[in-house]
């Protein structure tokens, strides 16, 4: 799955880190509620998102808890990158705090934009090599029966991520 948006010359790493910081606040809240992700890894997650946002290479990133046996999300925060249009900047938080996650592990899944796909394989390797988190390829976890809540986004200077929260039944 890939998406496309163009990079604005006025969108800077500072703007991207601002958006990443809002994602980081959500991840810290997950840590407070459920004990993961590790606090020591959150800064790396948000810096990776910021670098990809700045360059227009992020399509979507998921963070949450999945059942490793079925590869199904139990709780997922999805952030979809977007540019232009009517962007709103919301406050982080308002996450479910009573989800039962016994046996589930924290997991992150990322997809790159079509702009990233347009790069040569050596350019792609260079982008990935500059990220603070090394990702491996894998299948996206599934979202079976559950509820999804949209409507929150984090934006700055013409770019945003729209957040979706999925909770399995």
Image: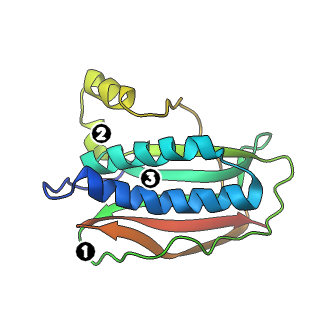
Q: Which residue is mark 2?
A: 116
Helix, strand or loop for disc 2: helix
Residue density around tag 2, few if under 14, some if 14–19, many if 20 or more, within 10 Å? many
Relative to 157, does residue 138 appear above or below in the rendering? Answer: above
- Of residues 66 and 34, the one nearer the viewer is 34
- Of residues 161 and 21, the one nearer the viewer is 21
Which residue: 60% across, 41% down?
A: 40
Is residue 115 at all visible to an observer of this figure? yes
Image location of residue 44, percent across then percent down? 49, 41
Q: Which residue is mark 1?
A: 85
Q: CA distance from mark 2 to mark 3?
A: 12 Å
Q: Is residue 108 left or right of residue 123?
A: right
What colour-coding does the image apply? rainbow
| Res 19 → quadrant | bottom left
Is residue 140 at all visible to an observer of this figure? no
Relative to 147, does residue 33 appear above or below in the rendering? Answer: above
Helix, strand or loop for disc 1: loop
Relative to 129, does residue 19 appear above or below in the rendering? Answer: below
Helix, strand or loop for disc 3: strand
Q: Which residue is mark 3?
A: 60
Relative to 120, does residue 83 appear above or below in the rendering? Answer: below
Furthest toward the top, the residue is 122
Residue density around tag 3, few if under 14, some if 14–19, many if 20 or more, within 10 Å? many
Image location of residue 161, percent across then percent down? 40, 63
Image location of residue 51, percent across then percent down? 33, 44
Which residue: 57% across, 62% down?
A: 26
Numbered label attached to residue 134? none
Q: Is residue 7 left or right of residue 106?
A: left
Q: CA distance from mark 3 to mark 1?
A: 18 Å
Which residue: 58% across, 71% down?
A: 93
């Amino acid at each position: 799955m890939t998406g496309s948006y163009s990079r604005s010359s006025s969108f800077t790493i500072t703007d991207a880190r601002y958006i990443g910081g809002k994602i980081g606040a959500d991840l810290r809240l997950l840590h407070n509620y459920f004990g993961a992700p590790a606090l020591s890894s959150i800064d790396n997650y948000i810096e990776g998102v910021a670098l990809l946002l700045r360059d227009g290479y992020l399509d979507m990133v998921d963070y949450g808890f999945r059942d490793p046996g079925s590869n199904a999300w139990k709780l997922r925060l999805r952030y979809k990158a977007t540019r232009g249009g009517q962007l709103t900047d919301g406050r982080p938080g308002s996450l479910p705090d009573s989800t039962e996650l016994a046996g589930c592990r924290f997991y992150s899944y990322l997809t790159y934009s079509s702009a990233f796909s347009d790069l040569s394989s050596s350019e792609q390797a260079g982008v990935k090599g500059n990220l603070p988190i090394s990702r491996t390829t894998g299948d996206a976890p599934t979202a079976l029966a559950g509820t999804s809540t949209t409507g929150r986004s984090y934006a700055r200077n013409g770019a945003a991520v729209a957040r979706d929260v999925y909770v399995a039944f």
